Image: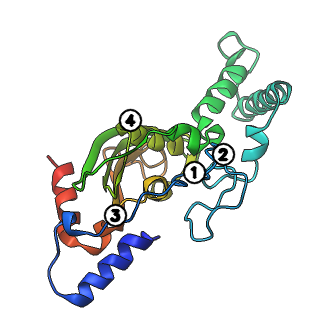
Amino acid sequence: MFRGGRGNERGEKREKEGSGDPPPSSLSKTPLHDGYGFRPPSGVSTPTAPPDRNSPLPDVNGLGWPAKSTLSRVNASPAEKAASQTRLAAAVRTVLECIGEDPDREGLLRTPERYAQSLMWMTRGYEERLADVINDAIFAEDHDEMVLVRDIDISSLCEHHLVPFTGKIAIGYIPNNLVLGISKLARIAETFSRRLQVQERLTKQIALCVQEAIKPRGVAVVMEATHLCMTMRGVQKPGSITTTSCMLGCFRTHHKVREEFLTLIKR
Protein backbone atom coordinates (compact mmCIF):
# COMPACT_ATOMS: atom_id res chain seq x y z
CA MET A 1 0.00 0.00 0.00
CA PHE A 2 1.30 3.40 -0.94
CA ARG A 3 2.21 5.65 1.96
CA GLY A 4 1.82 9.41 1.67
CA GLY A 5 5.40 10.55 1.22
CA ARG A 6 5.45 13.85 3.12
CA GLY A 7 3.05 12.78 5.84
CA ASN A 8 4.88 9.51 6.40
CA GLU A 9 8.30 11.18 6.64
CA ARG A 10 7.01 13.73 9.17
CA GLY A 11 5.38 10.97 11.19
CA GLU A 12 8.53 8.84 11.33
CA LYS A 13 10.59 11.88 12.37
CA ARG A 14 8.20 12.66 15.22
CA GLU A 15 8.21 9.09 16.47
CA LYS A 16 12.01 9.24 16.68
CA GLU A 17 11.98 12.56 18.51
CA GLY A 18 9.52 11.59 21.23
CA SER A 19 6.63 9.38 22.23
CA GLY A 20 2.95 10.16 21.97
CA ASP A 21 0.80 11.38 19.12
CA PRO A 22 0.74 15.14 18.51
CA PRO A 23 -2.58 16.69 17.51
CA PRO A 24 -3.13 17.26 13.79
CA SER A 25 -2.74 21.02 14.21
CA SER A 26 0.87 20.56 15.32
CA LEU A 27 1.87 18.90 12.04
CA SER A 28 4.13 21.10 9.96
CA LYS A 29 2.87 22.75 6.81
CA THR A 30 4.39 23.02 3.36
CA PRO A 31 4.10 26.16 1.23
CA LEU A 32 1.53 26.56 -1.51
CA HIS A 33 2.62 25.36 -4.90
CA ASP A 34 1.27 26.17 -8.33
CA GLY A 35 1.45 22.81 -10.05
CA TYR A 36 -0.78 20.94 -7.64
CA GLY A 37 -3.10 18.16 -8.62
CA PHE A 38 -3.34 16.96 -12.18
CA ARG A 39 -2.27 20.07 -14.07
CA PRO A 40 1.13 21.65 -14.76
CA PRO A 41 1.93 25.22 -13.63
CA SER A 42 0.81 26.49 -17.04
CA GLY A 43 -2.80 25.79 -16.11
CA VAL A 44 -3.39 23.29 -18.91
CA SER A 45 -5.98 20.85 -17.60
CA THR A 46 -4.36 17.73 -19.04
CA PRO A 47 -0.59 17.49 -18.53
CA THR A 48 1.42 17.04 -21.72
CA ALA A 49 4.76 16.51 -20.00
CA PRO A 50 5.68 13.48 -17.88
CA PRO A 51 4.58 14.02 -14.27
CA ASP A 52 6.77 13.90 -11.21
CA ARG A 53 8.50 10.53 -11.06
CA ASN A 54 7.48 10.24 -7.41
CA SER A 55 3.79 10.76 -8.19
CA PRO A 56 1.55 7.79 -7.32
CA LEU A 57 -0.44 8.57 -10.50
CA PRO A 58 2.10 8.14 -13.32
CA ASP A 59 -0.25 9.08 -16.16
CA VAL A 60 0.63 11.86 -18.59
CA ASN A 61 -2.99 12.09 -19.78
CA GLY A 62 -4.46 12.81 -16.37
CA LEU A 63 -6.72 9.75 -16.46
CA GLY A 64 -5.32 7.98 -13.39
CA TRP A 65 -4.36 4.36 -14.08
CA PRO A 66 -5.75 4.12 -17.64
CA ALA A 67 -6.34 0.63 -19.05
CA LYS A 68 -4.90 -0.65 -22.31
CA SER A 69 -7.72 0.71 -24.49
CA THR A 70 -8.67 3.75 -22.40
CA LEU A 71 -6.95 6.30 -24.63
CA SER A 72 -8.57 4.79 -27.72
CA ARG A 73 -11.97 5.27 -26.11
CA VAL A 74 -11.22 8.81 -24.94
CA ASN A 75 -9.92 9.94 -28.32
CA ALA A 76 -12.47 8.09 -30.46
CA SER A 77 -14.44 10.08 -33.02
CA PRO A 78 -18.26 9.95 -33.01
CA ALA A 79 -18.13 7.47 -35.89
CA GLU A 80 -15.65 5.26 -34.04
CA LYS A 81 -17.79 5.37 -30.90
CA ALA A 82 -20.85 4.34 -32.87
CA ALA A 83 -18.95 1.47 -34.48
CA SER A 84 -17.68 0.31 -31.10
CA GLN A 85 -21.19 0.34 -29.65
CA THR A 86 -22.46 -1.65 -32.64
CA ARG A 87 -19.79 -4.31 -32.05
CA LEU A 88 -20.73 -4.41 -28.38
CA ALA A 89 -24.42 -4.87 -29.23
CA ALA A 90 -23.52 -7.72 -31.60
CA ALA A 91 -21.56 -9.37 -28.79
CA VAL A 92 -24.57 -9.10 -26.47
CA ARG A 93 -26.73 -10.74 -29.13
CA THR A 94 -24.25 -13.62 -29.20
CA VAL A 95 -24.48 -13.90 -25.41
CA LEU A 96 -28.27 -14.16 -25.61
CA GLU A 97 -27.98 -16.94 -28.16
CA CYS A 98 -25.38 -18.78 -26.06
CA ILE A 99 -27.59 -18.86 -22.96
CA GLY A 100 -30.46 -20.36 -24.96
CA GLU A 101 -32.53 -17.27 -25.64
CA ASP A 102 -34.04 -15.91 -28.84
CA PRO A 103 -32.66 -12.41 -29.47
CA ASP A 104 -35.35 -11.86 -32.10
CA ARG A 105 -38.32 -12.21 -29.79
CA GLU A 106 -40.18 -9.04 -28.86
CA GLY A 107 -38.83 -8.60 -25.33
CA LEU A 108 -35.19 -8.99 -26.42
CA LEU A 109 -35.30 -7.32 -29.80
CA ARG A 110 -33.61 -4.11 -28.62
CA THR A 111 -31.84 -5.55 -25.59
CA PRO A 112 -28.39 -5.73 -27.25
CA GLU A 113 -28.49 -2.01 -28.10
CA ARG A 114 -29.89 -1.09 -24.68
CA TYR A 115 -27.26 -3.10 -22.86
CA ALA A 116 -24.45 -1.67 -25.00
CA GLN A 117 -25.59 1.85 -24.15
CA SER A 118 -25.96 0.98 -20.47
CA LEU A 119 -22.53 -0.61 -20.24
CA MET A 120 -20.85 2.39 -21.84
CA TRP A 121 -22.63 4.64 -19.32
CA MET A 122 -21.72 2.44 -16.36
CA THR A 123 -18.05 2.55 -17.40
CA ARG A 124 -17.93 6.24 -18.31
CA GLY A 125 -15.18 6.76 -15.73
CA TYR A 126 -12.68 5.65 -18.36
CA GLU A 127 -13.42 8.85 -20.28
CA GLU A 128 -13.08 11.28 -17.36
CA ARG A 129 -9.84 13.17 -16.81
CA LEU A 130 -9.18 13.90 -13.18
CA ALA A 131 -8.21 17.50 -13.91
CA ASP A 132 -11.66 18.05 -15.42
CA VAL A 133 -13.37 16.27 -12.53
CA ILE A 134 -11.67 18.49 -9.95
CA ASN A 135 -12.03 21.52 -12.25
CA ASP A 136 -9.84 23.87 -10.20
CA ALA A 137 -12.04 23.44 -7.11
CA ILE A 138 -8.94 23.70 -4.92
CA PHE A 139 -8.74 26.63 -2.55
CA ALA A 140 -6.14 28.10 -0.22
CA GLU A 141 -7.51 27.86 3.30
CA ASP A 142 -5.85 28.00 6.72
CA HIS A 143 -7.75 25.01 8.11
CA ASP A 144 -5.81 22.34 9.95
CA GLU A 145 -8.58 20.09 11.27
CA MET A 146 -10.10 17.01 9.68
CA VAL A 147 -12.45 17.30 6.71
CA LEU A 148 -14.77 14.32 6.36
CA VAL A 149 -17.49 13.35 3.89
CA ARG A 150 -19.21 10.06 4.63
CA ASP A 151 -22.06 7.93 3.30
CA ILE A 152 -21.14 8.55 -0.35
CA ASP A 153 -23.18 6.03 -2.33
CA ILE A 154 -21.30 4.25 -5.11
CA SER A 155 -22.05 1.53 -7.63
CA SER A 156 -19.42 -0.27 -9.64
CA LEU A 157 -18.89 -3.40 -11.72
CA CYS A 158 -16.78 -6.26 -10.41
CA GLU A 159 -14.09 -6.90 -13.00
CA HIS A 160 -14.15 -10.65 -12.32
CA HIS A 161 -17.82 -11.31 -13.14
CA LEU A 162 -19.09 -8.00 -14.57
CA VAL A 163 -21.87 -7.84 -11.98
CA PRO A 164 -22.48 -4.85 -9.68
CA PHE A 165 -21.27 -4.15 -6.19
CA THR A 166 -22.76 -1.26 -4.26
CA GLY A 167 -21.94 0.46 -1.02
CA LYS A 168 -20.86 3.62 0.80
CA ILE A 169 -17.55 5.42 1.07
CA ALA A 170 -16.17 7.77 3.72
CA ILE A 171 -13.33 10.11 2.72
CA GLY A 172 -11.38 12.20 5.20
CA TYR A 173 -8.25 14.35 5.00
CA ILE A 174 -6.31 16.90 7.01
CA PRO A 175 -5.51 19.95 4.85
CA ASN A 176 -2.07 21.35 4.27
CA ASN A 177 -2.95 24.92 3.20
CA LEU A 178 -5.27 23.64 0.46
CA VAL A 179 -8.84 22.34 0.64
CA LEU A 180 -10.81 20.50 -2.01
CA GLY A 181 -14.38 21.42 -2.95
CA ILE A 182 -16.52 19.02 -0.90
CA SER A 183 -18.51 17.77 -3.87
CA LYS A 184 -15.27 16.84 -5.61
CA LEU A 185 -14.65 14.09 -3.08
CA ALA A 186 -17.87 12.45 -4.23
CA ARG A 187 -16.98 13.13 -7.88
CA ILE A 188 -13.60 11.42 -7.46
CA ALA A 189 -15.28 8.38 -5.93
CA GLU A 190 -17.80 8.36 -8.78
CA THR A 191 -15.11 8.57 -11.46
CA PHE A 192 -13.16 5.57 -10.22
CA SER A 193 -16.28 3.53 -9.42
CA ARG A 194 -17.47 3.91 -13.03
CA ARG A 195 -14.74 1.55 -14.20
CA LEU A 196 -14.31 -2.19 -13.90
CA GLN A 197 -13.03 -2.54 -10.34
CA VAL A 198 -12.20 -4.58 -7.31
CA GLN A 199 -13.09 -2.92 -4.02
CA GLU A 200 -9.54 -2.94 -2.68
CA ARG A 201 -8.18 -1.05 -5.68
CA LEU A 202 -11.11 1.38 -5.79
CA THR A 203 -10.52 2.36 -2.16
CA LYS A 204 -6.81 2.96 -2.76
CA GLN A 205 -7.27 4.89 -5.99
CA ILE A 206 -9.63 7.36 -4.32
CA ALA A 207 -7.15 7.97 -1.50
CA LEU A 208 -4.20 8.43 -3.84
CA CYS A 209 -6.19 10.80 -6.03
CA VAL A 210 -6.99 13.11 -3.10
CA GLN A 211 -3.37 12.87 -1.96
CA GLU A 212 -2.13 13.88 -5.40
CA ALA A 213 -4.66 16.68 -5.86
CA ILE A 214 -3.96 18.77 -2.74
CA LYS A 215 -1.01 17.12 -0.96
CA PRO A 216 -2.77 17.05 2.44
CA ARG A 217 -1.09 15.91 5.63
CA GLY A 218 -3.07 12.70 5.46
CA VAL A 219 -5.94 10.95 3.67
CA ALA A 220 -8.25 8.20 4.89
CA VAL A 221 -10.81 6.23 2.89
CA VAL A 222 -13.10 3.47 4.17
CA MET A 223 -15.56 1.61 2.00
CA GLU A 224 -18.31 -0.90 2.82
CA ALA A 225 -19.99 -2.75 -0.05
CA THR A 226 -22.18 -5.68 -0.98
CA HIS A 227 -21.08 -7.75 -3.97
CA LEU A 228 -23.65 -9.45 -6.17
CA CYS A 229 -20.99 -11.90 -7.30
CA MET A 230 -21.09 -13.17 -3.73
CA THR A 231 -24.83 -12.94 -3.09
CA MET A 232 -26.37 -14.02 -6.42
CA ARG A 233 -23.89 -16.71 -7.41
CA GLY A 234 -21.04 -18.80 -6.00
CA VAL A 235 -21.21 -18.95 -2.23
CA GLN A 236 -24.61 -17.11 -2.25
CA LYS A 237 -24.37 -15.30 1.07
CA PRO A 238 -26.80 -12.35 0.99
CA GLY A 239 -26.25 -9.70 3.62
CA SER A 240 -22.47 -10.09 3.70
CA ILE A 241 -20.55 -6.80 3.69
CA THR A 242 -16.94 -6.26 2.61
CA THR A 243 -14.96 -3.45 4.27
CA THR A 244 -11.74 -1.98 2.88
CA SER A 245 -9.62 0.97 3.95
CA CYS A 246 -6.64 3.02 2.84
CA MET A 247 -4.74 5.30 5.23
CA LEU A 248 -2.06 7.71 4.03
CA GLY A 249 0.17 10.20 5.80
CA CYS A 250 -0.73 11.09 9.39
CA PHE A 251 -3.74 8.75 9.33
CA ARG A 252 -1.29 5.91 8.91
CA THR A 253 1.45 7.06 11.27
CA HIS A 254 -0.63 8.56 14.12
CA HIS A 255 -3.15 6.28 15.73
CA LYS A 256 -5.05 9.13 17.44
CA VAL A 257 -5.77 10.79 14.10
CA ARG A 258 -6.85 7.47 12.65
CA GLU A 259 -8.95 6.74 15.72
CA GLU A 260 -10.76 10.09 15.41
CA PHE A 261 -11.61 9.36 11.78
CA LEU A 262 -12.89 5.85 12.52
CA THR A 263 -14.98 7.18 15.41
CA LEU A 264 -16.54 9.94 13.29
CA ILE A 265 -17.60 7.64 10.45
CA LYS A 266 -19.43 5.35 12.89
CA ARG A 267 -21.69 8.09 14.28
- Which image quadrant is residue 104 in? top right
Q: Which residue is mark 2?
A: 46
Q: Which residue is rendered at x = 58% and y = 60% of the image? A: 57
| Marks 3 and 1, how far apart at CA | 18 Å
Q: Specify whether residue 232 is in view.
A: no
Amino acid at circle 1:
Phe
| Marks 2 and 3, how far apart at CA | 25 Å
Between disc 4 and disc 3, whose residue precedes? Answer: 4
Q: Nearer the viewer, mark 4 or mark 2?
A: 2
Q: Which residue is rendered at x = 24% and y = 56% of the image? A: 144
Q: Which residue is mark 3?
A: 217
Circles 1 and 2 in contact, beta carbons < 8 Å:
yes
Nearest the camera: 213 or 229? Answer: 213
Tag 3: Cα neighbours inside 10 Å, few (<14), some, or many (≥20)? many
| Marks 4 and 2, how far apart at CA | 21 Å
Q: Which residue is mark 4?
A: 183
Query: In this image, 108 relative to 177: left or right?
Result: right
- Which image quadrant is residue 249 in? bottom left
Q: Which residue is rendered at x = 63% and y = 70% of the image? A: 53
Q: Secondary structure at mark 2?
A: loop
- Which image quadrant is residue 111 in? top right
